[in-house]
Image (cartoon, rainbow, N blue to C red):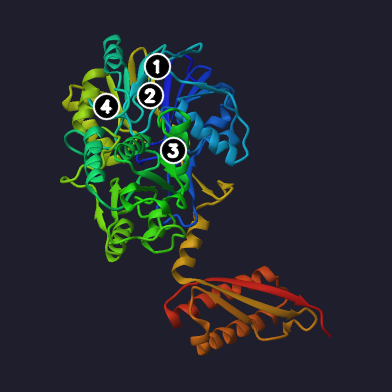
Amino acid sequence: MKDKRIATQVVALGGLGEVGKNMYIVEHDNEIIIIDAGVMFPEDNLLGVDYVIQDVSYLKKNEHKIKALFITHGHEDHIGGIPFLLQAIQIPVIYTPKIAQDLISKKLVERNIKYDNFQVITPELVVKFKHFTVEFINTTHSIPDSFALLIKTPNGNIFETGDFKFDLTPIGPMADIHKMAQAGVEGVTLLLSDSTNALSSGYSKSESAVDGTLNDMISKHHGRVIIATFASNIYRVKHIAETCRKYNRKIIVFGRSMENSVELALNNGLLKDRSLFIDANQAKSLKRNEICILCTGSQGEPLAALSRIANGQHKQISLLNDDLVIFSSSPIPGNAESINRIINKLYLKGVRVFTNSEFSDIHTSGHAKEEELKWMLRIIKPKYFMPMHGEYRMLKRHTELGVMCGINPNNTLICSNGDVIELYNGEVRKSGHIQAGDVYVDGSRVGDIGSVVIKDRKLMSQDGILITILNINTLTRKLLLKPNVTARGFVLVNENQELMQKIEHKIAEVANNFLAKSPYTYTDLKNQIILELLPFINSLTGRKPIILPVIMEVNQA
C-alpha cells in the first residue's frame, strides 16, 4: 500500500473469502485505524492448529501510524486475535463495547498480557483524530453491545456494518435504524456490509419467536430439560434463564465458556437473579421438572459438556429416560456429521431430542438474510459497495443484491484479503495489494507452523512415523548392533514381525554400504536412509511413513 497523502485507503487483513479472522484497516496520510481483530477456527486439514490469525506484517511496518483499534462486538471472529495482536504491535487505545471489553480482558489475563487502555463505546461517543471522525450506531446481533461504525474521512464517509440483522421484536435493544438512515441522508461513499447469510433467502426469524418456542417446550415437559446453545449467544442464555425462573426451574451450567458467559451476563446486569444457578450437588434435592441443564456442545465438539453427557463420561450427570435435549443452534458448516453422531447417541440413551427446523423455531441466526441485506443497502444508499465477512460465493451473491438495490455494477468491489481500496474525492477504486496471509497458532507458538509442518502432520496422521536408531562405531565405521526400529501409526509391530525384520535388514544394508564410503557426514547418511527406505517400505505396504533416523556415535576399539 503506497502512502498517498491525498487518498484514503481501505484494506482487509482478514474476513474476505472466509468466515472469521476479521480485521479491516483504514489509512489516511499518517493515521491508521484498525477495525476488529478476530480469529478463524482451523479446518480439519490443519492438524494441531488451534487458531488462524492475520498476517500483520503491514501493521508492523506502519506501527507509528496506528491510532486505535475499534471493536464492533464481542464474538471470537472479531476479538479472538487481540492477545496475539498486542504481543506483536503497540496499540495506543482499544475502543470496545462493554461486553466485549470484559471478554477481551479475560483473554488477556489468561495469557498474562497486561493492557488497560480501553475506552467503552456508547451510541453517543464520537472519536476524532486528525483525519478521521468515528461514530457508533447500535445494531442487533446475537450478542449484546453490537455496533456499526460510521467513519468520516477527507475523501468520503465509510459505513462498516459489523455483524447485524434486523429484528423488529428483539430480546435486547432495537437497531438504531433512524441513525443509519441519517447516515444515508448525509451520504455514504463506501459501504462494507456483513455477507454471512447472503445465500439465505427471506428474513431471519426474530429472537422473540425462539423465546416463544423454548418457553412452550420448557413449560410442557415434566422431566429435566437439557439445552445446548452457543455460549456467546448471551441473549439466548438470558431468555432461557428468564423462562426457567417463570416455571420454577433451577439451572445447572456445564462448560467453561458457558460458565464465563453466565458470569459475564450476571456482572453486567443482563441476568438479575443469581439464585437461579446451582451446582450439580444442589440438584439432588430437586424434582426432575425443577431442573434445566444449560451446556456447551451444540456443534458436537468431542470434549464439550453435551458430548461427555451423551457418551456417559460426564462425572456429574447421567441421562434419564424422560430427559429432553434441545439443540438451540444450527450446524456450522463442517459440523453436521459430529452433531449427528451426538444425536444418535442421545437417541440410543432413550431421550427425546429437538433440533432446529422449519417446524420448530429453537434457533435463529444473528446475521442478516437476503431481505435484511437489501434493507441495509436501501437505508445507507452507498455510492460504492464492498461486501465483507464471507466466503467468495457469499460476497458474490451480496454484490448481486447490491445491484438489485440500485448500485451501479461498476461501483461494486469483490475483494480478497490484502486488496487495497482507494477513496479519492468521493470516488473509489482498487489500487494495489499488500501482504495478507494466514498465520497459524499452535499452543503458545505463533507463526512458526508453516505448510511444511502441516504436510508432515498429515503424512503422520495417514501413514504414521517410523524411527530407527543406529549405533555406529566411529573407529571401525560399522554398525555395532542391528538397527532398532520403532513405529507409531504405521503398523502394529507385534503382528508384523517379518515386515519389521525386512525393514531392519534394509536399514543395516544401506547404512553399512554408506559407511564404507569416504568421506561422509551423518546428515548425508540420514538422507540416504530415507531416500532408499521410503520406496522400499512403500513397495511392501503401500504406505509412506515419516522416517526419522537417529545416529548414536560410540568409540569402541
Query: Which tag, 1 or 3, sits closer to the chain's start?
Result: 1
The secondary structure type at the circle numbered 3 is: helix
The secondary structure type at the circle numbered 4 is: loop
User: Do residues under tags 1 and 4 come within 8 Å of each other at their CB atoms?
Assistant: no
Pinpoint residue 171: horizontal percent, then vertical percent.
29, 29
Amino acid, disc 1: Pro
Which is nearer the eye, 421 or 169? 169
Instruction: State the residue position of label 2.
Output: 147
Residue 5 to residue 398: above or below: above
User: Do residues under tags 1 and 3 come within 8 Å of each other at their CB atoms?
Assistant: no
Amino acid, disc 2: Phe
Query: Which tag, 1 or 4, sits closer to the chain's start?
Result: 1
Amino acid, disc 4: Thr
Residue 402 appears in the figure: no
Residue 123 - label: 1
Instruction: State the residue position of label 4.
Output: 412
Residue 275 - label: 3
Viewer-nearest of discs 1 and 4:
1
User: Do residues under tags 3 and 4 come within 8 Å of each other at their CB atoms?
Assistant: no
User: Do residues under tags 1 and 2 come within 8 Å of each other at their CB atoms?
Assistant: yes
Query: Which tag, 1 or 2, sits closer to the chain's start?
Result: 1
Query: Which tag, 2 or 4, sits closer to the chain's start?
Result: 2
